[in-house]
């Protein structure tokens, strides 16, 4: 779950003499970074990006293209915030408590939450509106404003929280959409969102059931975004 000790030592040693160090992490999943992430001003999740990965990394580091990726998972601060793992287990049952949902339940912040990602510019949302347009879907609209001084690309995320049934307060990602906005300009964006993550499995009919009732819809730049915009919808 961490880099090798020698890699962490190198990061700290380089950052000690060069405060403008950027760490590019090549991995396919979450990597715990607590031993060194506060020592550097920037971390880039580079993934396993293939033959053109070097050119892509250079373009992002030099600012030729905006850094527009967003985390498809959360990165915790401690292995204790992950589901139990038994190295020698021959069978194990996992429930729904994993990832960002588990961190929210534990009440502990992520090092980097689900959907997190930065850009070379900054963005803001103006308002949020949502309407149900099908038995399992919503249309969510907001105005995205580029508040920085260079063009950029944002990934607008829609989260849903049930307010009046069991599991009330649980946040689920319902949809997302990218948008390019020139510096200082605004763009109206409509994001298609699925209600299925808020559904419940009916064992008798073996079908997913989406209960009616109130949900809070959040337009955000990631799970737990303090600047998110909210609205409410009554499901049919």
Image: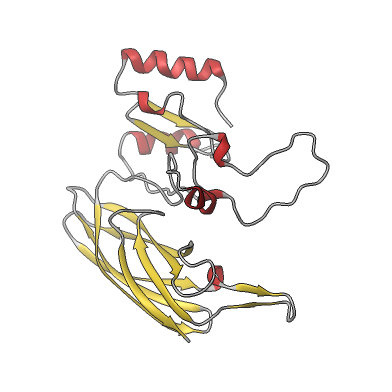
Q: Residue 235: x, y in percent? A: 46, 82
User: What residue appears at the point 29 percent right and 20 percent down from the top-left corner?
Assistant: 19
State the residue in front, 78 or 1: 78
Total residue callouts: 0
Q: Is residue 226 above or below residue 52?
A: below
Residue for point 40% across, 48% down: 116
In the image: residue 205, left or right of residue 123: right
* Of 194 and 57, the residue lying toward us: 194
- Find residue 83 and report its image quarter: top right
Q: Position of residue 43 (x, y in %)?
A: 40, 33
User: Is residue 27 visible to us here?
Assistant: no
Q: Is residue 87 visible?
A: yes
Would you identify the image quadrant in which residue 3 lies? top right
Identify the residue at image location x=69%, y=39%.
Answer: 85
| Residue 114 appears left or right of 15 | right
Q: Is residue 142 above or below residue 90?
A: below
Quadrant position of the N terminus in the picture: top right
In the image, 137: left or right of 226?
right
Q: Residue furthest bottom?
A: 236
Instruction: State left or right for residue 86 relative to residue 225.
Output: right
Q: How is the image coloured?
A: secondary structure
Q: Is residue 38 above or below residue 194?
A: above
Q: Quadrant of residue 202?
A: bottom right
Identify which residue, 107 or 142, lies in the foreground.
107
x and y, in percent, of residue 191 in the image: 39, 70
Instruction: In the rendered view, tell whether residue 29 sits above or below residue 129.
Output: above
Residue at coordinates 49% horizontally, 20% vertically from top-left?
Answer: 8
């Amino acid at each position: 779950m961490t880099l090798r000790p020698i890699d962490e030592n190198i990061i700290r040693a380089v950052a000690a003499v060069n405060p403008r160090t950027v760490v590019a992490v090549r991995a396919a999943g979450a990597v715990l970074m607590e031993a060194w992430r506060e020592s550097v001003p920037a971390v880039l999740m580079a993934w396993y990006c293939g033959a053109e990965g070097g050119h892509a990394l250079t373009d992002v580091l030099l600012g030729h293209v905006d850094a527009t990726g967003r985390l498809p998972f959360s990165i915790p601060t401690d292995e204790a915030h992950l589901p139990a793992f038994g190295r020698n287990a021959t069978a194990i049952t996992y429930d729904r408590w994993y990832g960002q949902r588990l961190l929210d339940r534990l009440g502990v912040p992520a090092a980097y939450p689900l959907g997190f990602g930065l850009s070379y510019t900054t963005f803001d949302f103006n308002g949020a509106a949502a309407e149900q347009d099908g038995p399992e879907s919503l249309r969510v609209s907001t105005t995205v404003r580029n508040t920085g001084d260079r063009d950029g690309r944002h990934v607008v995320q829609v989260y849903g929280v049930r307010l009046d049934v069991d599991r009330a307060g649980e946040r689920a990602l319902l949809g997302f959409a990218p948008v390019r906005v020139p510096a200082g300009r605004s763009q109206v964006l409509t994001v298609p969102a699925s209600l299925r993550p808020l559904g419940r499995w009916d064992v008798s009919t073996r079908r997913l059931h989406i209960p009616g009732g109130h949900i809070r819809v959040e337009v955000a730049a990631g799970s737990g975004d303090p600047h998110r915009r909210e609205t409410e919808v009554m499901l049919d």
